[in-house]
């Protein structure tokens, strides 16, 4: 079974590009464009990993991450924060919320893929 990745970002072009790349590597990608929808999709699709932007409509990525990590049903799902925000305070806040990794945009696709493999424990 291919691993399911929930990709949450409000930049539609970026979502399309990242989805294409991940699907070409054999992942099943489910997309969401806002924080509230992301929470609903987590419940429905039970992803193996979440790639989450911080600046989202309806509910920001910090809150989405914190809510998922505080819920025993979803706390084990690895979350990669995927954002243009590169301030140390942003990194600290996401660690506090329970994120597993932090990747800034613009990004190196190989770095993103390597982090996904690491968090999904693939090839080990």
Image (cartoon, grey):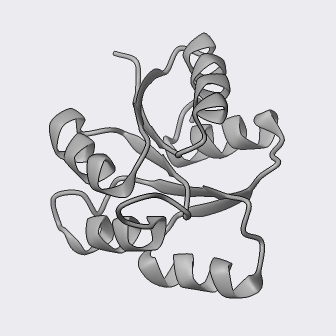
- At 61% from the left and 17% from the top, the residue drawn is 20
Q: Quadrant of residue 60?
A: bottom left
The quarter in which the N terminus is drawn is: top left
> What residue is shown at x 53% (from left), y 48% (from top)?
119
Left or right: where does residue 25 sit relative to residue 46?
right
Which of the two residues, 74 or 118, is positioned nearer the viewer here? 74
Give the image quarter of residue 95: bottom right
Of 107 and 12, which appears nearest the observer? 12
Tell me residue 50's x, y (percent).
44, 47
Q: Residue furthest front?
A: 57
Q: How many marks?
A: 0
Above or below: residue 28 compared with residue 79: above
Tell me: 95 left or right of 85: left
Residue 103 percent across, percent down from the top left: 71, 57
Above or below residue 35? Residue 13 is above
Looking at this view, is 29 or 48 the one in front?
29
7 sits left or right of 39 in the view: right
Displayed quadrant of residue 101: bottom right
Q: Quadrant of the C terminus?
A: top right
Image coordinates of residue 61 in percent, x first then y, are: 46, 65
Question: Which residue is located at x 54 percent, y 76 percent?
Answer: 94
Q: Residue at x 54, y 33 (%)?
A: 122
């Amino acid at each position: 079974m291919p691993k399911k990745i929930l990709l949450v970002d409000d930049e539609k072009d970026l979502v399309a590009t990242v989805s294409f790349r991940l699907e070409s590597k054999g992942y099943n990608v489910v997309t969401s464009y806002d924080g509230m929808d992301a929470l609903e999709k987590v419940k429905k699709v039970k992803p193996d990993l979440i790639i989450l932007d911080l600046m989202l409509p309806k509910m920001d990525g910090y809150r989405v991450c914190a809510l998922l990590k505080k819920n025993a049903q979803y706390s084990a799902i690895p979350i990669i924060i995927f954002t243009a925000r590169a301030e140390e305070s942003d990194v600290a806040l996401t660690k506090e919320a329970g994120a597993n990794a932090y990747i800034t945009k613009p990004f190196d696709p190989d770095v993103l893929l390597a982090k996904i493999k690491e968090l999904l424990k693939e090839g080990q």
